[in-house]
Amino acid sequence: MNFLVLLLVAVILRFTPWRGGFPIDVLGYWSDWVGRVTRGRSSWLFLIMLLLPLPLLAVVLWLATGVAYGVLTLIIHTLLVLLCVGRSDPLGTMTSAVGEAWQRGDQEAASVLAERDFGVVGDDAAVLLQGLRGRMAAEACHGYFVPAFWYVLLGPIVAVGYRLAWLASQRSDAGGNAFAGALAHALEWLPVRLMGLSFALVGHFDATLAVLRRVVLQWEPQTVQLAQWFTAAALTESSAVPVAQPLDVMRTFLLRAVLVWAVVIAFISLMG
């Protein structure tokens, strides 16, 4: 059922207005609320309250088992995965404003938009492009690859738990956000390296594999930094692409990486 759920989610993301997942950012609202009510209190209280929905969701899934021949379970799984999808849409509109400025040849506007929207600063077009590509890869990792990995491996509860931890580490100013960040980093450790392997398969294989070998056992590098390194290595030979639409190359590249993951997940589902 895992592959069917991910296929349904992919169809919803592609052919409906829900490009950024579920229309209401339920997990984001919960993370923000927990951060407010636990501000100044124990970090453990923050983490416990943040993850409180997980056992409740587990009970709901248990009660739904076998109802309507599994259709209810399928619907709940699909909704939960949609809640875990990132809202930035790196495969679509995430960098559309910067891309339009680039297409007009307005390098200054592209630089301003990149710094304002993504915190990417570059002295020239090449550095700016590399930073934007790395940011797109990082958003794809947080919003697609990591939730999909944990959903296939351990089910929707762990995927939701990762999304809550990541949101808390990004949005909350409570003391527990360091705990949430450490949890998110731990859950990203393996998936981001598998993402790097998929980048090697669809990009420059030798260069990306060399980077992957160097960092495969390291704990310290953050996902954003790894995404930058993997992307720069995988797209080493893309400098010959016309500069008019440089970010389209990255979108196509990410789509190919997603297809690699889809093929592997389909194979695992068939074998299982």
Image (spheres, rainbow, N blue to C red):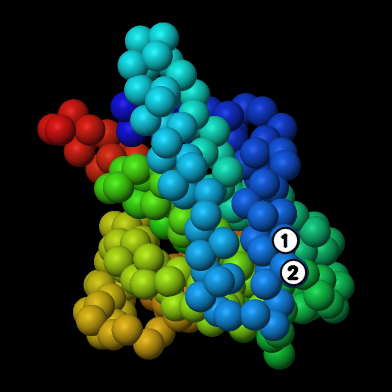
Residues under numbered marks 1 and 2 in contact, where contact means CB atoms less than 8 Å apart: yes
CA–CA distance between discs 1 and 2? 5 Å
Identify the element where label 1 is drawn.
helix
What residue is rendered at 71% in x and 32% in y?
A: 17
Amino acid type at image mark 1 = Trp
On residue 36, the disc is 2
Residue 66, given in percent of the width and then of the height, sits at 33, 16
Q: Observer-nearest residue: 72 or 266? A: 72
Residue 24, given in percent of the width and then of the height, sits at 72, 42
What residue is rendered at 25% in x and 73% in y?
A: 209
Given the current orientation, which residue lies at the most extreme top position? 68
Instruction: Describe residue 85's horizontal placement relative to residue 257 as left or right.
Output: right
Quadrant of the snapshot with the N terminus: top left
The residue that disc 1 covers is: 33
Q: Observer-nearest residue: 110 or 28? A: 28
**In the picture shown, does residue 76 fall above or below 121?**
above
Q: Residues within 10 Å of mark 2 (few under 14, many from 20)?
A: some
Q: Observer-nearest residue: 257 or 215? A: 215
Quadrant of the snapshot with the C terminus: top left
Identify the element where label 2 is drawn.
helix
The answer to which image quadrant residue 29 occupies is bottom right
User: Can residue 250 be seen in the rendering of this structure?
Assistant: no
User: Can residue 153 be seen in the rendering of this structure?
Assistant: yes
On residue 176, the disc is none
